[in-house]
Image (cartoon, rainbow, N blue to C red):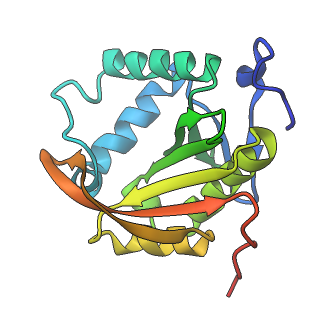
Amino acid sequence: MRMPPFRDGWLRHLRLDGERVFLRPMRGKDWRQWSRLRFGSRDFLMPWEPTWPPDALTRGAYRRRLKAQNLDSRHGAGYTLHVFRHQDLALIGAITLGQIRRGVAQTATLGYWIGEAYARQGYMTEALALMLVFAFRELGLHRVEAACLPSNEPSQRLLRRLGFSEEGLARSYLRIAGEWRDHLLFARLSDDPPPVRG
């Protein structure tokens, strides 16, 4: 899996494999599966996300996402990977490691979502663990940050299970569902001890 991010074409071959899931970059052919999953999970996802535009699930909107992801990855600014289930190759969610800051920071921000039918089954725990290995070992980052709404207890439990520490409250941090909302801030460092599995 060790491929330097500066080599041409390396992202096309990126694949992070776990026991039940694997991650790879989004591709144009994923649009229908992605759109169906997002549509079927709309009510489940919308309370935690920015307001969806009217064309959110169209092929054109997906192409814009893909173009932005390719641009970010070429510049080492961020990586969006789709999460697939091994058993049936179903697309079940996505993870973004974005806002990568190099220099003295070596930091990135983690974002993620999962389709409602696949939630709370351990898939995202496994997928995020794979992404953290990629962030720390392959990209050489020192710190990965994440934020979630104070009311999103499942997401808080997920982050703590992965060894993230809560660092405080950011007021009016992100515009979610049309309103500026406070968020709890979490972070994990490359040299933090591994999480205790219990």
Q: Position of residue 127 (x, y in %)?
A: 63, 55
The answer to whether 178 appears left or right of 114 in the picture is left
| Residue 36 locus on image (x, y percent) | 36, 38
The relative height of residue 1 versus residue 19 in the rendered view (above or below) is above
Residues 80 and 33: in front is: 80
Say which residue appears at 81% left-offset and 16% top-offset: 7
Which corner quadrant holds the C terminus? bottom right
Residue occupying the far left of the picture? 179
Query: Nearest the camera: 168 or 195?
Result: 168
Residue 165 in the image, given as x and y percentages of width and height: 54, 71
Q: From the image, which quarter does the N terminus lie in?
A: top right
Instruction: Identify the residue shown where x is 58% and y is 37%.
Output: 81
Outermost residue toward the front in this view: 104
- The residue sitting at the bottom extreme is 198
Q: Nearer the viewer, residue 97 or 141?
A: 141
Whether residue 98 can be seen here: yes
State the residue in front, 144 or 50. Answer: 144
Q: x, y (%) of residue 72? A: 54, 22
Count of labels shown?
Answer: 0
> Residue 192: which quarter of the image?
bottom right
Q: Is residue 150 shown left or right of residue 120?
A: left
The residue shown at (24%, 60%) is 182
Residue at 84% in and 29% down: 3
Confirm whether residue 86 shows in the render. no
In the image, residue 98 sits, relative to residue 194, either above or below, namely above
Residue at the top extreme? 8
- The vertical placement of 54 against 193, above or below, is above
